[in-house]
């Protein structure tokens, strides 16, 4: 026989006691493997979702709110290095919308409507998966393909008809003064031709989210026609099976730069005719030319002039505000003209135009038609009234007084009707009464003379002024020129300069590697493996403790064997090695069994995660997916921790000498240690108990009397409860010490039982302490449950004091805070609904698409969505409570009140930095950032900038995004149109339901969805709250398992005291008496633990009584204590029966 | 006089008190004892007189509170725990009142247990025929593959004796080796012990209440209240009993 042979022989011989060890390790392994497998499953599911979202797409060329020519994709393809059969390029026109059934019964919040060409489906996930043999054909004209998830929600099938309301794209940004905002959306009635599964791009979307995006696919050319966007698109998707996404991105970037031209930027050069022959003019679809265009022209050596023609509502001789005391001319165009750059115009016609506009700040030239109409002459003072866009998208009438510096005849350069840009709804109209500009005009004010002017001269400006002055008046974030004019030859040099100096990025057209971030986002923001291991902590610890106790229990039965080995010359480490090897084999067997059980456990947890615990994963569909690595890691981790637990618990065995081990007095050393110095320990325990109890009392009293936030108060009470728990355990310790050394005669078997409990004080206290701590943690953890505030109007709560949170599918281009803005949606004081909103106030937010960084998104956040707000609107309301802020002056976080903290959004943190505020939980857990950290974003002009987190909010409804200043946001994204998020203030006297009804009905066309902030907060809180429930359930299971350990304590105690029990039997105790004696001793330990843990938990839960009510809070505590008590008593009784099966008298004979 | 194999000088042993306020228990009070190589000694005395403690100190299982223990030229007080374990393994053989055989191993395997910790495979293998031979000499050749549960008490104790001798120790220590056996088995085991010790040239020290066994020894010493009674007293005891 060898050393190993001895180990094997031991294993075989003591198999009965080893079965328990194996099962204990198996449970621990199952839970660890299960936790890791849950993590794997979440990762695998997110990876699946990522692949299904982007299919075979590697790179997207996106232009957002701008539109390039729809052949850009083909031009890019031609510019790519070589034509690869593995490459697919598809051009789409993507717009937002929402859809509903024809009956209106079911509707989607947001639907992405994609106008696609046939090649798009070649990029579908099924192509990579090779699951479809044939590509799906593009939708027929006027028909659509709908994803199955949307179809299910709407209850539609192939052949059904749906109503899709889409955002009508506009060449002009909708925020631009002259942009049309009344036709912001378009309703399409479309027949469903096919339903798309996840592998057919049913989940298509570039934004990381595990929630299926609603997708409606229609034919590109059909959508272009419907939206009046013929020849235009805003996305090109490229996939190359052979190349890495980063290579495709690099190639696509080069190809885009080669293929991109001014037409794609919405610019065109027009050769002027007639008197202007030989001249050319640059114009843009957006009317205003990007500032970059002007800057290049200014720096170029080619001479050119800039033109800014603006629509003026009224030119009047009247004093502002005093109606009827002067003459006025409605709706005129006024041109500001000037030289660009240092080189003077090389053509006399251009010189004449510049001269016409005059020079200097006081120059203002009118034509004789206007002079005649206003009956004025040179030197007269007139007033111009025109619209400018206010901060809140309100059209504000601005007025400027000028003195007429000259009057020119309406001829020659002054009669140049080409100075009028292509204002939509204006320049293409035959007569004035058909005008449909984007601004409100009163057609009744148009006189016959105005109509004749239009007939004869179209939009020929009636007045001229120098360019610089015009830019001061009418320049805006979209640009400050409406045209650049030069000789044809100079223009072609300018075009070259623009092509050289400006790239697609300058016009908001960017190339994005979509694959890399999609795959990266499939890495879960939360490590679910770690999370579930944490939530299963009690279960794992209980299983390990049980494993170790069972193993040690087995060792204790073999103490004399150990003693023999030591006596015959084995060193302690030799014996340890024997036991370690045994433990290793047992742990190995247990882990193999546990790995199998772990798979079952995973399926059980996943089943719960898709049903009762679905809130924990934001209702994501999680598929089973476990990697062999996790099973191996879980099994090895389990073996390791089992061995450590065994080593820790079994270290005491070797504290006994070989002599003690050999003798029948094994355990005498414990008795000796336990009974020595009992008095001092009892005194110390009392002192510690008083200190811990006093600390708990102070904490609870201070927390009760202070104005603490709910979270801090709950934390304080939890800490107070923990102090009371410690005090309780110290009291039990002192009591055990006193019973152990009591000199008073024992008067009953119950007293004898208590005296026995004090004999092995360490063991007894460990049992009581573990039960108490476990009960406390599992029962008191619900104090960390997040609750919506009782009063949603409380400003420093998570609602910010707002009653509703609104999200619209289509941008709202009006100021909903103004009566005029509401009136645009039919919400006037004349209507019941309008009156309901009289006292409501709305804070609008702009939204930049990005990753949802709330706890409702499982994936990693690469670029959180941005909310832009005017900080003063939140500051003046002192909305939300700040967790901490980082001011530009201080390097360390400080506390600021809401009124001052919001102003940090407008503070200067250095060049290229946009300060942002985010929800503390989102920042920490989902974004994994802290104050001072930031994200790199690319703005509309392709410039990188940093969004730096400078403040965090406590548990707010603004989870999931970073909030930035609106002004800074618009500087970065001037084309961003309108608001899509709204915080609604409703005074207490107003009927909340009426406000909800009014806004929902009034803004139905923009797809407004209004959620109660309380519900929103509850939905966000439900994630954490579900984790707490999971912890309680798994922790409760752990405690139940752990209570079996009490049975082992019973077994150990009885086996050590067999001779004593034999003696009691000898002197006449019946087996029933002996059983009662043992059960009472251990029931007392169990009871003490439950009382300590339960009472401490109730103290920790006191703050939640108010918000949740006493019974809902106390019931779980009572249930936990009752179930654990019942389980503990059961194990004690079973262990007592098992141990007493051997007649105690036999022990006497052994002695 | 033959060479002294083991010498105990002024050995005392105290055990800590079980309860506060109670004095330590002094089990041995300045014991001086020498045993010669190849001789046999019986230690007798009333229960609680410290016989087993003395034996365990002699075998390096316990350390004395004071005094010195030199066995086979080795001062045990200077030895580390590992060295003492090696000393026990190589130089000492123990036989207890209870045989302490490993129930999971056969008689032969139990005999070989002390050799298992040998690093040398050759030594381990060399021990097997010796074990078999020893078992044969104690009449257990046919029971070599039996487990303790299949052997009688006397047979188990014989196996224990063989286990003690497998390393050919210089010192064979027996603590009440016949205490749990019937008269016939006691006699047989007693004879075996003396015979085997002699045959292997081992010095036998046995603690016993049995005068029958004690009388088989070359010398009897009595321990009373932690002190050795002079040898002439032992002789008187011998005569009285």
Image: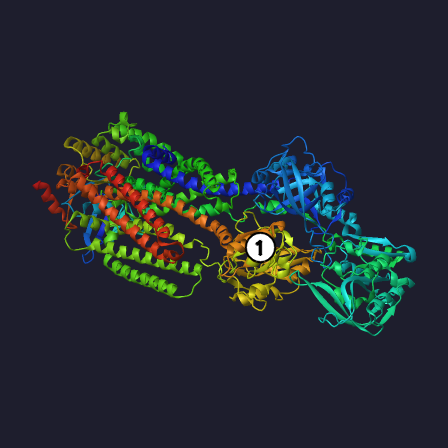
Residue A91, given in percent of the width and then of the height, sits at 72, 43
Displayed quadrant of residue B180:
top left
Q: Nearer the viewer, residue A259 or B47?
A: A259
Q: What residue occupies the far top of the structure in this picture?
A: B142
Number of numbered discs visible in the structure rendering:
1
Q: Nearer the viewer, residue A370 or A521?
A: A370
The residue pinned by badge 1 equals A961
Position above or below: B72 against A682: above
* Image side of residue A550 versus residue A263, left or right: left
Label 1 sits on a secondary structure element that is strand
* Image side of residue A117 versus residue A417, left or right: left
Position above or below: A854 against A312: above
Q: Nearer the viewer, residue A628 or A691?
A: A691
Position above or below: A1023 against A308: above
Quadrant containing the N terminus of chain A in the rendered view: top left
Displayed quadrant of residue A790:
bottom left
Crowd around label 1: few <14 · some 14–19 · many ≥20 (10 Å): many
Whether residue B170 is visible here, answered yes or no, is no
Residue B159, given in percent of the width and then of the height, sits at 26, 32
């Amino acid at each position: 026989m060898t050393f190993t042979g001895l180990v094997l022989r031991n294993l075989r011989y003591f198999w009965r006691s080893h079965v328990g060890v194996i099962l204990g390790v198996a449970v621990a392994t199952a839970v660890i493997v299960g936790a890791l497998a849950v993590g794997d499953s979440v990762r695998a599911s997110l990876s699946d979702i990522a692949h299904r979202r982007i299919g075979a797409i590697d790179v997207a060329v996106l232009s957002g709110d701008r539109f390039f020519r729809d052949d850009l994709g083909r031009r890019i393809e031609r510019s790519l290095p070589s034509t690869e059969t593995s490459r697919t390029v598809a051009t789409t026109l993507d717009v937002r919308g929402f859809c509903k059934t024809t009956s209106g019964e079911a509707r989607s919040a947001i639907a992405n409507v994609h106008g696609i060409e046939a090649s798009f489906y070649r990029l579908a996930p099924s192509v990579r998966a090779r699951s479809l043999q044939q590509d799906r054909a593009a939708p027929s004209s006027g028909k659509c393909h709908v994803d199955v998830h949307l179809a299910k929600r709407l209850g539609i099938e192939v052949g059904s008809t749906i109503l899709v309301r889409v955002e009508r794209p506009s060449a002009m940004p909708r925020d631009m003064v002259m942009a049309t905002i009344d036709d912001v959306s378009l309703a399409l009635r479309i027949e469903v031709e096919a339903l798309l599964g996840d592998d057919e791009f049913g989940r298509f979307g570039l934004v990381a989210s595990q929630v299926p995006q609603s997708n409606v696919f229609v034919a590109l050319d059909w959508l272009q026609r419907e939206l009046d966007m013929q020849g235009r698109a805003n996305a090109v998707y490229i996939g190359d099976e052979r190349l890495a996404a980063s290579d495709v991105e690099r190639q696509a970037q080069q190809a885009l730069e080669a293929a991109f031209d001014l037409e794609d930027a919405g610019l065109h050069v027009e050769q002027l005719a007639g008197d202007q022959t030989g001249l050319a003019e640059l114009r843009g679809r957006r009317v205003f030319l990007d500032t970059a265009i002007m800057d290049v022209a200014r720096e170029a050596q080619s001479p050119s002039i800039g033109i800014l023609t603006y629509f003026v509502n009224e030119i009047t001789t009247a004093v502002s505000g005093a109606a009827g005391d002067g003459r006025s001319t409605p709706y005129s165009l006024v041109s500001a003209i000037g030289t660009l750059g240092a080189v003077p115009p090389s053509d006399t016609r251009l010189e004449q135009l510049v001269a016409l506009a005059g020079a200097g700040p006081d120059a203002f030239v009118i034509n004789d038609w206007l002079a005649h109409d206003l009956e004025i002459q040179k030197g007269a003072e007139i007033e111009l009234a025109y619209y400018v866009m206010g901060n809140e998208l309100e059209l504000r009438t601005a007025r400027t007084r000028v003195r007429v510096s000259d009057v020119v005849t309406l001829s020659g350069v002054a009669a140049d009707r080409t100075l009028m840009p292509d204002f939509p709804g204006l320049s293409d109209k035959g007569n004035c009464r058909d005008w449909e500009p984007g601004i409100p005009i009163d057609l009744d004010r148009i006189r016959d003379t105005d109509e004749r002017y239009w007939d004869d001269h179209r939009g020929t400006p009636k007045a001229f002024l120098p360019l610089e002055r015009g830019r001061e008046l009418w320049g805006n974030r979209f640009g400050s020129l409406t045209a650049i004019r030069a000789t044809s030859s100079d223009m072609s040099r300018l075009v070259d300069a623009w092509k050289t100096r400006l790239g697609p990025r300058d016009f908001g057209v960017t190339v994005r590697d979509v694959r890399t971030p999609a795959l990266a986002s499939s890495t879960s923001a939360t490590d679910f493996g770690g999370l579930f291991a944490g939530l299963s902590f009690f279960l794992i610890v209980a299983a390990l403790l049980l494993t170790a106790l069972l193993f040690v229990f087995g060792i204790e039965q073999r103490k004399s064997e150990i003693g023999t080995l030591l006596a015959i010359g084995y060193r302690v480490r030799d014996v340890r090695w024997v036991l370690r090897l045994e433990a290793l084999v047992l742990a190995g067997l247990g882990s193999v069994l546990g790995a199998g059980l772990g798979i079952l456990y995973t399926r059980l947890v996943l089943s719960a995660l898709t049903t009762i615990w679905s809130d924990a994963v934001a209702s994501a569909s999680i598929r089973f997916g476990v990697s062999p690595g996790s099973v191996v890691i879980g099994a090895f981790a389990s073996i390791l921790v089992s061995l450590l637990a065994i080593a820790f618990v079994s270290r005491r065995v070797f504290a006994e000498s070989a002599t003690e081990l050999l003798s029948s007095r094994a355990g005498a050393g414990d008795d000796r240690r336990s009974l020595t110095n009992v008095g001092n320990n009892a005194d110390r325990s009392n002192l510690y108990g008083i200190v811990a109890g006093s600390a708990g009392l102070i904490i609870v009293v201070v927390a009760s009397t202070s104005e603490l936030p709910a979270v801090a108060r709950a934390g304080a009470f939890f800490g107070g409860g923990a102090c009371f728990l410690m005090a309780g355990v110290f009291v039990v310790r002192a009591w055990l010490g006193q019973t152990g050394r009591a000199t008073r005669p024992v008067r009953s078997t119950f007293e004898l039982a208590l005296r026995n409990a004090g004999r092995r004080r360490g063991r007894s206290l460990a049992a009581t302490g573990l039960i108490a701590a476990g009960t406390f943690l599992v029962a008191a953890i619900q104090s960390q449950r997040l609750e919506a505030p009782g009063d949603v109007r409380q400003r420093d709560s998570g609602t910010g004091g707002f009653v509703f949170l609104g999200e619209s599918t289509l941008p709202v281009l009006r100021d909903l805070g103004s009566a005029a803005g509401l009136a645009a949606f039919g919400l006037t004081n004349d209507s019941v609904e309008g009156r309901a909103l009289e006292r409501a106030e709305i804070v609008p937010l702009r939204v930049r698409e990005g990753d949802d960084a709330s706890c409702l998104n499982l994936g990693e956040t690469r670029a959180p969505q941005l909310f832009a707000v005017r900080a003063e609107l939140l500051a003046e309301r002192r909305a939300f409570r700040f967790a901490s802020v980082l001011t530009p002056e201080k390097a360390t976080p400080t506390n600021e009140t809401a009124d001052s903290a919001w102003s940090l959004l407008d503070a200067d943190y250095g060049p290229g930095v946009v300060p942002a505020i985010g929800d503390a939980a989102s920042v920490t857990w989902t974004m994994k950032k802290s104050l001072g950290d930031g994200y790199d974003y690319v703005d509309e002009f392709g410039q990188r900038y940093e969004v730096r987190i400078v403040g965090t909010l406590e548990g707010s409804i603004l989870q999931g995004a970073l909030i930035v200043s609106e002004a800074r946001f618009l500087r970065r994204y001037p084309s961003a149109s309108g608001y899509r998020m709204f915080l609604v203030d409703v005074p207490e006297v107003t009927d909340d339901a009426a406000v909800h009804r009014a806004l929902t009905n009034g803004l139905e066309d923009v797809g407004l969805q209004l959620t109660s902030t309380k519900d929103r907060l509850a939905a966000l809180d439900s994630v954490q709250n579900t984790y707490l429930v999971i912890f309680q359930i798994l922790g409760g299971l752990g405690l139940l398992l752990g209570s079996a350990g009490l049975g082992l304590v019973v077994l150990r105690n009885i086996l050590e005291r067999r001779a004593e029990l034999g003696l009691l039997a000898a002197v006449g105790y019946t087996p029933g008496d002996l059983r009662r004696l043992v059960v009472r001793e251990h029931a007392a330990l169990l009871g003490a633990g439950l009382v300590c843990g339960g009472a401490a938990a109730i103290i920790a839960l006191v703050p939640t009584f108010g918000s949740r009510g006493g019974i809902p809070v106390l019931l779980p505590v009572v249930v936990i204590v009752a179930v654990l008590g019942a389980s503990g008593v059961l194990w004690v009784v079973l262990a007592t029966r098992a141990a007493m099966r051997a007649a105690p008298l036999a022990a006497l004979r052994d002695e | 006089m033959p060479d002294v194999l083991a010498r105990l000088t002024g050995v005392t042993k105290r055990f800590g008190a079980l309860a506060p306020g109670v004095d330590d228990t002094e089990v041995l009070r300045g014991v001086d004892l020498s045993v010669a190589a190849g001789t046999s000694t019986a230690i007798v005395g009333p229960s609680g007189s410290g016989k087993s403690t003395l034996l365990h100190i002699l075998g390096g299982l316990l350390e004395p509170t004071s005094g010195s223990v030199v066995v086979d030229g080795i001062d045990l007080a200077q030895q580390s725990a590992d060295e003492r374990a090696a000393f026990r393994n190589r130089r000492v053989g123990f036989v207890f009142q209870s045989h302490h055989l490993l129930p999971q191993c056969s008689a032969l395997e139990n005999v070989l247990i002390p050799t298992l910790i040998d690093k040398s495979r050759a030594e381990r293998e060399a021990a097997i025929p010796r074990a078999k031979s020893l078992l044969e000499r104690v009449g257990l050749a046919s029971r070599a593959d039996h487990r303790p549960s299949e052997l009688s008490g006397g047979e188990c104790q014989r196996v224990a004796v063989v286990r003690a001798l497998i390393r050919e120790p210089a010192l064979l220590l027996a603590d009440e080796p016949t205490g749990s056996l019937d008269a016939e088995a006691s006699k047989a085991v007693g004879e075996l012990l003396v015979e085997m010790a002699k045959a292997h040239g081992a010095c036998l020290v046995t603690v016993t209440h049995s005068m029958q066994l004690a009388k088989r020894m070359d010398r009897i010493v009595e321990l009373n209240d932690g002190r050795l009674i002079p040898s002439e007293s032992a002789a008187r005891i011998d005569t009285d009993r």
